Image (cartoon, helix red, strand yellow):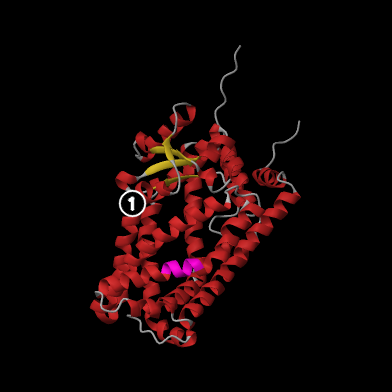
Amino acid sequence: MSQPMTPAAEAARMIDALGPEALAKAQAYTTGNHWLLFAAVGVSILIAWIMVRFRMLDRVAERLQGRSWALGTFLVGVAFFLISAVLELPFTIYTDWQRQHAYDLSTQPLGDFLGQLALSEVLSGLLGGLFLLGVYSLIRKTGPRWWLWGGGFSALVTVLMLLSGPSLIMPMFNKYEPVPPGEVRTALEKIADDVGIPHDRIFMYDGSRQSERFTANVAGIGPTARIAIADVALKEASLAEVVAVTGHEAGHYKLGHVWRSAIILPLLAMLFFFLLNRLFAPTARLLGSDARLDEPRGLPVFAVVGSVLGLAITPVTNSLTRIGEVEADVYSLQTVNEPDALASALVKTAEYRYPRPSALQEMLFYTHPSVEKRVLRAMEWKAAHPKAEAPKTP
């Protein structure tokens, strides 16, 4: 009689079952994404240089002379976002559309992609313009310590986005409908009860419009909190997989990870503003800009400092995110106890997140622990917490 496989052997078997071709494809896609992080910084610097070289924001600011300071600042901010989006369009099409199709991760037509991208950029421009108006107001009114106030302002904006995102912004890009009655809804209602989300906040959405990825999420806070599961998951996953994945996402909500983000993000914003206060002038000189820190026409300098600092702190933010993912996995295992289903669902994510990175690669670039580690954890849980078998019929 053969001995049962160890958790490590079972995890390795599940990853090996993907086959060498699929693993090589996942590795190429994932490694390419990591190189694109560096390419994005280069693109940001190039766009900033073009905007400074051709005085694009200067021209916008000159046309707005005579208007109120607040309106002028807002409109220059909006112009910055929209001009940046246009200049970055070829890179965005390559990274967010062409590569996704090349690796069979999306079937979204280019026209639909561009339509959604245009909506996203206009919305980002308007909201970003308002945010920058607040930042420049603080620079003008609070003096050298403006970066401290900027952190508090970022906290307020973060909470407002958490409240408004699920109900106002996300429905602009996808259609959300109640999960129809049946065993899936019944299972999701139990998870919703565990985390205190009303049953009328359980939705399915047409995630296949943008991506073929198997996913679910629990988003929002307070009255806007809701569970949403993509139609891809409902079409391609078993009931146990849906429960396991939703249990993981519910864990993020139950464990307060959203509030953790509401604290960490403003602190990171405060750090960015502090460093920007010191790096703006030398960066402006390198770009050939004569803008001052309190002038919105200096936004290309903001962008360069932000992109470089963002890349520099990526290992730190990724580490914090990985901690949350481990905690959410444990929550799913503890509450729904579907280790096999969680493991099989995780293996499905290996097509866009190579499951066997090096330790250095995982530390620097991975927002989630490697798939093989997560599958191993599920198998270890299964070995330590065997389900009770139903009694046999005489």
Q: Quadrant of the C terminus?
A: top right
Towards the viewer: 134 or 202: 134
Which contiguous range is marked in magenta? 81-86
| Residue 345: image location, x then y, percent | 58, 42
| Residue 323: image location, x then y, percent | 49, 56
* Residue name at image x 54 percent, y 48 percent: 210
Going by the image, does 120 lie left or right of 62? right
* Residue name at image x 62 percent, y 44 percent: 348
- Residues packed near mark 1 inside 10 Å, few (<14), some (14 to 19) or many (20 plus): some
Badge count:
1
Asked if residue 67 is positioned above or below residue 247 in the image, the reply reads below
Q: Main secondary structure of the magenta part?
A: helix
In the image as oriented, which residue stretches furthest toward the front?
63
| Residue 380: image location, x then y, percent | 59, 44
The residue type indicated by label 1 comes to Ser
Asked if residue 278 is positioned above or below residue 90 in the image, the reply reads below
Towards the viewer: 145 or 200: 200
